């Protein structure tokens, strides 16, 4: 089976990278041996192997929700929802809301939008629904608010006993309000281990249960992640995580490239970039350091951000997620009249046009002074996504250590919360 490949040749010359290659290897050793900052948060490193004993239990919970619900509400914010959302969006139909046979997966607790929650309550009225509530701390305001409201609606619509069966909580083993509540109500629970931070939790029950609820193959996702682990053990030549971490740090530290754009030419990858932004933003943005993670969906955003990428400030790096083969075939038809002048494309697949757009964009951006790196993903499926997620996590750990920050804490996230609690007069603030 083909592997995901990484190409940095359009971003940096390999001779220039020599010293960063050594720095990346040293950072990888620190990560592997658990000798760096935040080393009490390395449970994700072996998660693809350790989670295997829990897969059938997770699949059984998903089967129950799948059988009994028209809608499954997945409550969580940040690392507690982005991984599942990213995989589900990448692998379900683009028109899932109209197309999908099984229960619809919807998300809540990732914002404090009053209209959003009203519209969700309205959608759920008179429907059989279940809830997966995910919060490691069990005290985060956004998901706690959504859970309070939707739990009450579920109990009112279906009765307390039925609601008790249709709620699953994923939280700390002992601490937090969600743990106390789940124990008291007798909900099915899964534990987020102490040594796994939110943004590194997609391959734990946090990501796996909502992904299994969508009818996707979590065994294949984990198999792909295990392959990702193997690739991270390779020597430099065959180690995409090491190469990626080294190249992006070289561009940041030696060429003052401050922003990395993760771009895709596949509309289903939008939320993979949202997950990646959270992973890299929360892991590296510290002590007034770090590459700002941004993203663009191409060719869509070539008609909005394209001008800036081509000719704006030369502070950008571009990393392309390139999917090699599509699942479906659409051939461009021949038209007798050719009024739109598109007959030169007739007989081609849509993806042939997309691939030329990708190549043409890469050439233009490199010519315009935007170093461009590229991950080639053979196909969009559970296996390759599992592999990609693990490679990004591992590269993020290495990259954080190369920057001399702790990639596993997020002290800055507290600042807005303190102000909000003071303004809302929360007891103790
Ligand atoms: O990556 C992180 O640690 C954060 O994004 C958390 O996942 C997010 O803040 C949600 O926290 P919790 O799961 O405790 O509700």
Image (cartoon, grey):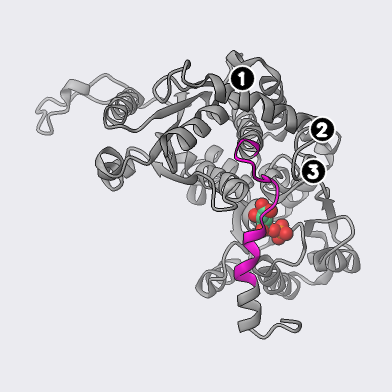
Q: Earlier in the sequence, mark 2 or mark 1?
A: 2
The magenta stretch is 401-417
- The answer to whether residue 326 of the structure is visible from this angle is no
Q: Which residue is mark 1?
A: 239
Residue 269, given in percent of the width and then of the height, sits at 49, 39
Q: Is residue 279 visible?
A: yes
Residues at marks 3 and 2, CA–CA distance in whole angstroms: 10 Å
Q: Residues within 10 Å of mark 3 (few under 14, many from 20)?
A: some
Q: Which marked residue is nearer to the observer: mark 2 or mark 1?
A: 1
Question: On the rendered image, what quadrant is the C terminus found in?
Answer: bottom right
Mark 2 burial class by Cα count in 10 Å: few <14, some 14-19, many 20+: some
Tell me the SS state at disc 3: helix
Q: Secondary structure at mark 1?
A: loop
Instruction: Report whether the residue tagged 2 is closer than 8 Å to ligand 1.
Output: no
Q: Are marks 3 and 2 in contact (CB under 8 Å)?
A: no
Picture quadrant of residue 27: top right
Comes first in the chain, label 3 or label 1: 3
What residue does disc 2 label?
52
Q: Nearer the viewer, residue 259 or 117?
A: 259
Q: Quadrant of ligand 1?
A: bottom right
Look at the numbered disc 2 and give the secondary structure of its residue.
helix
- Specify whether residue 411 is painted magenta: yes
The structure residue drawn at horizontal position 56% and vertical position 22%, both measured from the top left corner, is 19
Which quadrant would the N terminus be assigned to in this image?
top right
């Amino acid at each position: 089976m083909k592997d995901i490949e990484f190409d940095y040749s359009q971003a940096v010359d390999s001779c220039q990278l020599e010293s960063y290659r050594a720095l990346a290897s040293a950072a990888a050793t620190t990560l592997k041996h658990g000798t760096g900052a935040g080393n009490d948060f390395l449970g994700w490193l072996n998660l693809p192997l350790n989670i295997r004993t829990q897969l059938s239990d997770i699949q059984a919970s998903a089967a129950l929700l799948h059988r009994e619900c028209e809608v499954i509400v997945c409550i969580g914010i940040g690392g507690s929802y982005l991984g599942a959302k990213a995989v589900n969006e990448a692998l379900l139909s683009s028109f899932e809301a109209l197309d999908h046979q099984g229960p619809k997966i919807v998300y809540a607790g990732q914002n404090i939008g009053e209209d959003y929650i009203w519209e969700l309550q309205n959608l759920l009225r008179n429907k059989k629904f279940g809830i997966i509530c995910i919060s490691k701390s069990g005290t985060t305001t956004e998901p706690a608010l959504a859970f309070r409201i939707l739990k009450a609606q579920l109990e009112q619509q279906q009765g307390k006993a039925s609601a008790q069966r249709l709620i699953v909580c994923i939280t700390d083993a002992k601490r937090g309000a969600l743990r106390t509540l789940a124990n008291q109500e007798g909900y099915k629970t899964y534990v987020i281990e102490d040594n796994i931070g939110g943004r590194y939790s997609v391959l734990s029950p946090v990501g796996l249960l909502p992904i299994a609820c969508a009818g996707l193959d979590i065994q294949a996702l984990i198999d792909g992640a295990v392959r990702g682990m193997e690739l991270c053990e390779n020597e430099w030549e065959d180690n995409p995580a090491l190469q990626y971490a080294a190249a992006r740090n070289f561009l940041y530290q030696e060429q003052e490239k401050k922003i990395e754009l993760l771009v895709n030419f596949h509309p289903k990858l939008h939320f993979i970039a949202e997950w990646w932004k959270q992973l890299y933003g929360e892991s590296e943005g510290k002590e007034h350091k770090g590459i700002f993670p941004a993203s663009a969906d191409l060719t869509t955003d070539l008609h909005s951000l394209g001008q800036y990428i081509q000719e704006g400030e030369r502070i950008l790096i571009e990393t392309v997620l390139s999917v090699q083969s599509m699942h479906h075939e659409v051939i461009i038809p021949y038209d007798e009249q050719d009024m739109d002048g598109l007959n030169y494309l007739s007989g081609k697949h849509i993806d042939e046009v997309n691939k030329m757009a990708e190549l043409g964009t890469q050439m233009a951006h490199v010519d315009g002074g935007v170093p461009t790196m590229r991950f080639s993903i053979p196909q969009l499926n559970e296996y390759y996504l599992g592999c990609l997620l693990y490679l990004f996590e591992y590269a993020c750990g290495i990259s954080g250590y190369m920057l001399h920050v702790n990639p596993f804490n997020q002290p800055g996230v507290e600042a807005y919360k303190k102000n909000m609690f003071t303004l809302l007069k929360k007891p103790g603030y």
